[in-house]
Amino acid sequence: MSAVAPVVAVVVGNPRPASRTLEAATYVARQLVDVEPDLVVDLATVGPGLLDQQDADVSALVRQVADADLVVVACPTYKATYTGLLKLFLDRFAPDFGTGLTGLAVPLMLGGGPAHALAPELTLRPVLTEIGATVPVRGLYVLDAAHDDPAAYAAWLVGARPVVSTLLAARTGAPA
């Protein structure tokens, strides 16, 4: 097998376009693979096509995300879980019909305080697993106020980076 660079996608379920959640997700993706993501899906900019199961643009995004080697799925914490906007997008993935996630996924959630620190593990990880992804590391929860502070990610990255690198290398043949 010849080595290929991993395809990296970021999916953000914040209802505000160009949000802090988007900044955090692209930062995590860059830190995990040392390159910019190949695809960034800011669901706030997708529009009403998310409600139409036949929408060709959303279907194309689903296929691209499904085929990515690594997907960072990020969302603010709303009512102790992820947003309805993200739910609409994730509902499009159906492993039994060939549109499940096929690669690795990293759940990332931002929140206002530490009370919901388990939200990525308890709410987002299970749905990512259900739609086919391999979730090899624990979900990351970052306080909204610290979204732009590299220290907020540092300890998590120390453990996550080698696991993700090793699994991506096995998947793509690229060096770890």
Image (cartoon, rainbow, N blue to C red):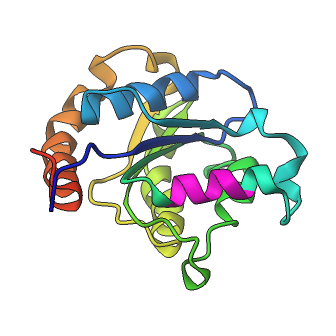
Quarter of the figure that contains the C terminus: top left
Q: Residue furthest left?
A: 175
Tag count: 0
Q: Relative to the observer, which residue lies in front, 134 or 125?
A: 134
Residue 75: quarter of image: top right
Q: x%, y% of residue 169?
A: 16, 52
Q: Is residue 101 above or below residue 85?
A: below
Q: Is residue 105 above or below residue 156?
A: below
Residue 29: quarter of image: top left
Q: Residue at x 74, y 52 (%)?
A: 58
Q: Residue at x 45, y 35 (%)?
A: 38
Q: x%, y% of residue 5?
A: 27, 43
Q: Give the range drawn in magenta.
A: 59-66
Q: x%, y% of residue 55?
A: 84, 57
Check if residue 32 falls in the magenta segment.
no
Residue 2: quarter of image: bottom left
Q: Relative to the observer, which residue lies in front, 7 or 165?
A: 7
Q: Which residue is drawn at 27% across and 54% down?
A: 137
